[in-house]
Image: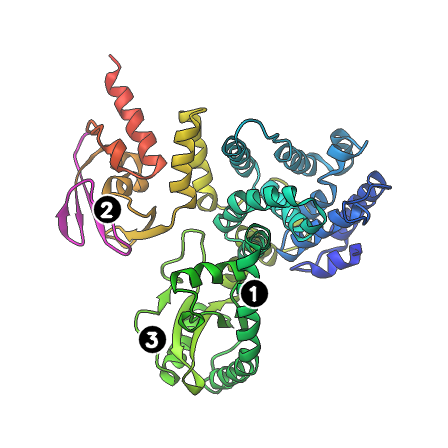
Amino acid sequence: MTLEDVFKASKFPLSSEGKKFITDAFMVASEAHVGQKRKSGVDYIEHTLETAKILAEIGMESRTIAAGLLHDVPEDTAFTLEQVKEKFGAEVSDLVDGVTKLGKIKLRGSREEYFLENLRKMFLAMAADIRVVIIKLADRLHNMRTLGHLPSEKQERIARETMEIYAPIANRLGIGEIKGELEDLCFKYLDPENYAITKKLVKKHIHESDAYIKQTTDTYKKDLQKEGIPVIEISGRSKHIYRLFKKLQQHDMDMQRIYDLVAIRIIVPTITNCYEALGLVHKKYRPMVGRIKDYISLPKPNGYQSLHTTVFGPEGRILEIQIRTQKMHDEAEFGIAAHWIYTEKESKTWRNIIFRQNTVIPNKELEWVKQLQEWQKEIGRDDEEFLKSLKIDFFKNHIFAFTPKGDIIHLPEEATVVDFAYAIHSEVGSRIAGAKVDRKMVSLDYHIQNGQVVEILTSKEPRKPNRDWLESVKTSAAKSHIRKQLKKEKMP
């Protein structure tokens, strides 16, 4: 691995200034880590280069890549954080410091206590600068790739921590590629028997499908071009091993019932082209009822957008097809990191992005982090409440519902209309007097179903919340506001 490999891996071309900045960081890291070895026996600098390469691959800019090269320097070498700041500026030193602090969580007490403490620090880091966590994800991904060189007890501990903390965070940030690979690597160490069985099944079926996929992608490309629909890329992709195993568990380990083992991915220039391509696919091949999903109009909570359909393809074989724009594809693969790619493309000069200060991600992308911080402050060190709320807000599957105007509100499964009201605004929640779902009156503890239209009926003045709501609502935001209102009512 060389620095040139990092440059070649970059999602977008780096300017000469950006390359020099990264090169300077590499020189410092190389000198600081000289003589240090990994457990595998390779020079330590290999790890920092691999971390930087992953960051480059997901489209991060030069300062983040530089911080990736330097992330272990203050912790493991004589080169101090102050020296990093003096040479590379406060922005890079803050990133390095953030990553260092994330690594200083010592196991004390139960594994669950360690788990919670790690998550708390993750959330604080995300709110301060999301890039800290992205660097940590890249660092963890390479550590997982080389986990085989550690003793078995460490392999199990690190793999479990990664499956419980890092993979869900990668998923919540929408970084599909990192999330998928982390889960597969963890699966290998946490359940080696089922990993081997699933991998064997995948290898057999993928091998059988290779020629078919090639024929199908060539056919679709010709058909789309014939209709004048521009195509950026058509390719096949196989399902990640862990995701496939979870799906097989739901279908008695029967591969014949898995329709998306291999999916055809069609990437086109515009949203209009997406729907045109979908129409052509359905015109040529009969779609399966109930298997058409429009994640463009209704994105997933982590921002994922694409059209999905399952059709009876050539030779009558069932095939999943995903259709999206290049931007949607980048955001599906790289999640929140893709914002840097598109800020870069829309910038007038390379310099504006590579040497900008105070990078900002749109508020909506990190709104959930801010909410987590708010209720975390309120419940303090109540670990049981923290974990309970976390499992609902962070790990639980989500649904979407609509306001009468068509705005989308994302909520955890089993959320009530009171959750919906507080998700719109705290004022709406504090004035809720009733609710209609799909134009029918419902009780305030009604559990909203996916895709329903919810209308909140409000009073002119704020109302005292019902204490029982604390038992029925699911979101931490609703619980937090209800507690505040109840506390306020008690005040003289």
Say if residue 431 shows up in the picture: yes
- 117 lies above or below 283: above
Mark 1–mark 2 distance (CA, rounded to whole Å): 39 Å
Say if residue 131 shows up in the picture: no
Label 3: which residue? 288
Could you say whether the residue bearing mark 3 is in a helix, strand or loop? Answer: loop
- Within 10 Å of disc 3 (Cα), the crowding (few <14, some 14-19, many 20+) is some
Could you say whether the residue bearing mark 1 is in a helix, strand or loop? Answer: helix
* Amino acid marked by disc 2: His
Q: Nearer the viewer, residue 340 or 246?
A: 246
* Amino acid marked by disc 1: Lys
Where residue 401 sits in the image (x, y, percent)? Answer: 29, 52
Image quadrant where one finds the C terminus: top left
- 28 lies above or below 210: above
Of label 3 and label 1, which has the lower sequence position?
1
Question: Which is closer to the viewer, label 1 or label 2?
Answer: 1
Label 2: which residue? 447
472 horizontally vs 41: left or right: left
* Amino acid marked by disc 3: Met
Of label 1 and label 2, which has the lower sequence position?
1
Label 1: which residue? 199
